[in-house]
Amino acid sequence: MFAVYAKEANLDDPLASLVVGERPDPIAKERWVRVKATHASLNQHDIFTLREAAIACADHYLAGQDPMQGYASPLHMQSLVGFPPLWVTVSGSEVLRDDTVEFAARLAREGGTVAMSVRADLPHVWPVILPEAPATTDTISEMAAFIGEIA
């Protein structure tokens, strides 16, 4: 997540962080829920909702790096104070849901600005892979409204 990297590298803070399908804790594999892939447009196989695939992707994502670094696992940062405003959405049917909800809740507890949307029955990063879907239009409208509120 660039906002974490910017904080650790003493760069200017971004205005906000807009996230679709965040992975705030790639080492929390034991917490990742088992979910049933149901999105018909992907022939019942959304690989990013399958727990085993998520574990393999997390291992690849870390590539041997320290998983406790903030930009690898923002949930493990000592403090989220000063984190830029966060707008985040995640599918209610994907394995990363619980980590994302936990990260947003922690940021809010530490005084951060958080807007979160959990969407039912959509694949991971649906705005990218389903650009014509009504849910994508709604998601982009929510992002734009959030930017308008903080800008």
Image (cartoon, rainbow, N blue to C red):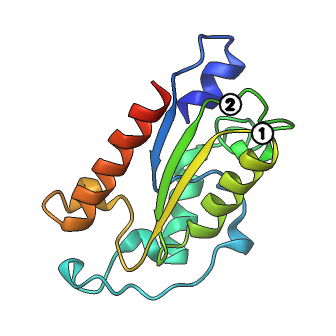
In which quadrant of the rendered view does residue 125 lie? bottom left
Secondary element under disc 2, as helix, strand or loop, is loop
Q: Mark 2 to mark 1: distance in Å?
A: 9 Å
Q: Position of residue 6 (x, y in %)?
A: 61, 20
- Quadrant occupied by the N terminus: top right
Q: How many marks?
A: 2
Indicate the position of residue 84 as horizontal and vertical percent values. 61, 29
Determine which quarter of the picture holds residue 107: top right
Give the residue type at disc 1.
Answer: Gly
Which residue lies at the image location 20% right of the left edge and 66% below the top edge?
134
Vertical side of 40 occupied by 91: above or below:
above
Please say whether residue 25 is visible from this viewpoint. no
Residue 24, image x and y in percent? 63, 50
> Where residue 111 is drawn, which disc sits there?
1
Q: Is residue 30 left or right of residue 12?
A: right
Other-residue count near label 1 (Cα within 10 Å), few / some / many at <14 / 14–19 / ≥20: few
Q: Looking at the rendering, in which quadrant would you find the C terminus?
A: top left
- Of badges 2 and 1, nearer the viewer stands 1
**Direction right: furthest residue:** 78
Q: Residue at x 51, y 85 (%)?
A: 35
Res 83 label: 2
Name the foreground residue: 34 vs 136.
136
Query: Dot 2, crowdedness within 10 Å: few (<14), some or many (≥20)?
Result: many
**Which SS class for mark 1?**
loop
Above or below, comparing residue 144 to residue 122 in the picture: above
Residue name at image x 59 percent, y 55 percent: 59
Which sits earlier in the primary sequence, circle 2 or circle 1?
Answer: 2
